[in-house]
Image (cartoon, helix red, strand yellow):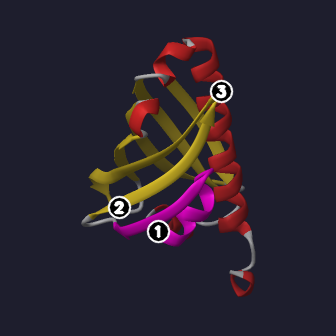
């Protein structure tokens, strides 16, 4: 499945970039994220609880960054296993650009699932993926845009 989107975040590009590389911000932004440890240089390890239709799973996996152009773009790739529920893996190209309102974040995601989750059908999986992406960027925007003394 493929997802694309654009969000305008009311913050300068350096601030958005810093948060895109911050484990605490990412943990707060990822729906269902229970743990996120590591660093942009070494990669992150994550534990995420997710419900896809009738299937609930706890996914454990890794996230790595590559093709990093400081302050402008990177490729983020991850894969995780949810035990008998199946697996998920994917990657996203993320780009930042200055706009009058702050920073425009553009993403292009390609994702694959297998196991029980894949048996649920493309329509359900695509809907859950879109909803999860929207939740992530809503959470991310709120976290980045809040006053720094509230962080």
Front residue of this view, candidates 73 and 56: 56
Residue at coordinates 55% horizontally, 13% vertically from top-left? 122
Span of residues in magenta = 23-39
Q: Helix or strand or loop: what does disc 2 sit on? A: strand
Q: Which quadrant of the figure contains the C terminus?
A: bottom right
Of badges 3 and 1, nearer the viewer stands 3
Q: Position of residue 95 (x, y in %)?
A: 46, 46
Of badges 3 and 2, nearer the viewer stands 3
Lateral position of residue 128 relative to residue 82, left or right? right
Disc assigned to residue 23 = 1
Q: CB atoms at circles 3 and 1 under 8 Å apart? A: no
Q: Is residue 30 magenta?
A: yes
Q: Position of residue 133 (x, y in %)?
A: 61, 39
Report crowding for label 3: few under 14, some 14 to 19, many 20 or more residues within 10 A (C-alpha): few
Lateral position of residue 21 relative to residue 140, left or right? left
Q: Is residue 34 magenta?
A: yes
What residue is shown with label 2? 44
Q: Position of residue 94 (x, y in %)?
A: 44, 45
């Amino acid at each position: 499945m493929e997802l694309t989107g654009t969000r305008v975040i009311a913050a300068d590009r350096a601030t958005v970039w810093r948060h895109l590389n911050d484990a605490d911000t990412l943990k707060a932004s990822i729906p269902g994220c229970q743990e996120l440890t590591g660093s942009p240089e070494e990669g992150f390890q994550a534990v995420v609880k997710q419900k896809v239709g009738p299937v609930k799973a706890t996914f454990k996996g890794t996230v790595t960054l590559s093709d990093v152009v400081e302050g402008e773009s990177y490729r983020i790739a991850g894969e995780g296993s949810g035990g008998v529920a199946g697996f998920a893996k994917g990657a996203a190209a993320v780009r930042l650009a200055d706009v009058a309102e702050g920073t425009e974040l553009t993403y292009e995601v390609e994702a694959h699932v297998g196991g029980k989750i894949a048996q649920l059908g493309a329509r359900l999986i695509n809907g859950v993926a879109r909803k999860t992406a929207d939740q992530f960027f809503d959470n991310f925007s709120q976290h980045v845009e809040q006053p720094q003394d509230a962080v």
